[in-house]
Image: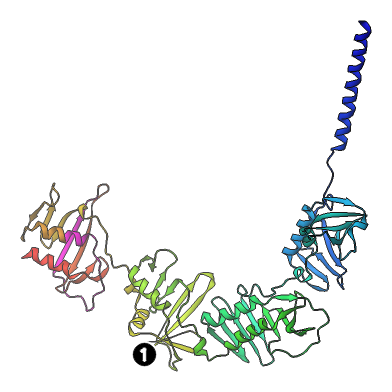
Amino acid sequence: MIASRTGLALATALACLLAIILAFDLQRDTAPVERAIVPGFDADRVTELTWQGRGEELRIVRAPQGGWSWSDPPGQADTRTIEDVLATLRGARWHRRTDVAAAGELGSVVAIKSGADTVRLAIGQPLAGGEQQWIVVDDHALLVDAWVVRGVDPAPVALRVRTPLARAAEASELAIVRPSGSLAVRGSPRQLVQRGDSSLALLLAPGPVDELERALIALTVVELPRAPSQPQQISQLTQIRLDGKLAVAMAGGCPGQPARLVIGGPAGIGCVERAAWAAIEHAVAALEAPLEDLVERRPVPVEPTRIRLADRSVLDLAKRPRLDGVDADLTRVAELLAVLATPAEPVALPPTAPIGQLEISARGGFAVAIDLYPDHLLARHGEPIGLRVGEGAAAILAAAGATFRDPTLWNEEPTTISALAIDGTTYTRGAVLGEWTRSGPGRDDATTIEQLVRLLASPRGLPPRTAVGVARRQVTLTVTPPSGPPSTHTLALDPRCAGSAGQRTVAVAPEICQLIERLRQ
């Protein structure tokens, strides 16, 4: 019995020992395997990338101030493509690892330099089906997804800036250099400032300049030259400059590609389609049209923020329109803005001196002076082309500042008007709405009084067409608000319903005078 118990204890101890050994062995076999193709890769430490085995070496280095550039051959690298390469190196993982022989014949080699360390990846052969491919790192062949190979070994043309004129629309100046003389546009909106040997200032209609910008932006490098290009005169456009700096220069024909041309510049050399270059030539030729066909027909093609009128009054339009610090008439201001934004007829610039001028400012630093001439003509100051507007539009442009003042004399709630005095007669509001008591001569007509009070609560005054005569009627309103002290408003009116309201000379609506006379009968 004792022997049986002893044997059972030994068997149990042996089983426990075997279980412990098995657990340690399993833990060792299931330890994680580092599957990164470049273990410990740190993209921020990469200083240089090199591609070899494509007939030439392409070397791209990180600039000290940031960004990437081609060192050999020289030029600008496409930052997004480089960042994609680094992201692939950071995230790629292998599926199988074996001897180098499994990778087959090796192609291009990618070298990644980080400080003093360099890692080389050789591109091997794909597996059947093409979804996976071998690469060789150090002394091992690694099987990876095909996208990894595409990510670390992009086409050479993808590594350079392919659209060297992509920011043409944002550039403050575009210049086309030709043997016959340069053509340049500047500012926003675009202004033609040079054509041939002549300097000028002409605000351009959007159509021709938009066509030029679209053609410049669309110019795309489609391949890198397979051989050195022989310089030759292929186009009258020799250079394109953005903001005074060379962006693209014509270099000649693309070797072996009759339908393509070679361009150079800070971004490096590359082949572009002849059709793309021809589109630029066509857009430049359009800017050689007669000036009257190119001129911006809208007197002011942007929304003004400030207008100095012909009489030197100032309209501030940055927020609610104000005229010399007081509210402006929204309707009259809208009429003025509509005239400035409406296309006019291009005409020859008048030989006479202007009779007035508007000075207009807008956001973004835009400023222009509009010279006013007789016979409904105007011109942007300094431009060689005039514009003809209609008679009514010309009158609005030449109007004095007082025309744009808000005609509302005051604005009160009708029910807060507690008394209405007309000459020597006073109507006082009663306790019941619509009830009025009169002191002095006149008529008791509650309906007429209510109509008059409603109009006088918010009267709109207009500048009188003739001189103001002797006041015939004096009307005084007493306003008693729910809180605060009472106030008064006074109108002195002549027989034509013109007169004064405080310091303002006005002519009020004829209906007001008609109602006043009805109460005085």
Q: What's the magenta region?
A: 452-481
Q: Position of residue 102 (x, y in %)?
A: 90, 57
Q: Position of residue 331 (x, y in %)?
A: 33, 70
* Mark 1, residue position: 375
The crowding category of the residue bearing disc 1, from other C-alpha atoms within 10 Å (few below 14, some 14 to 19, many at least 20), is: few
User: Residue extending furthest bottom?
Assistant: 351
Q: Is residue 22 left or right of residue 330?
A: right
Q: Quadrant of residue 237?
A: bottom right
Which residue is depicted at the point 8% across and 58% down?
A: 445
Residue type pointed to by label 1: Asp
Magenta span includes 456:
yes
**338 vs 420, nearest the viewer:** 338
Which residue is depicted at the point 42% across and 75% down?
A: 308
**375 vs 272, nearest the viewer:** 272
Asked whether the viewer can see residue 367, the reply is yes
Which residue is depicted at the point 61% across and 86% down?
A: 282
Q: Quadrant of residue 56?
A: bottom right
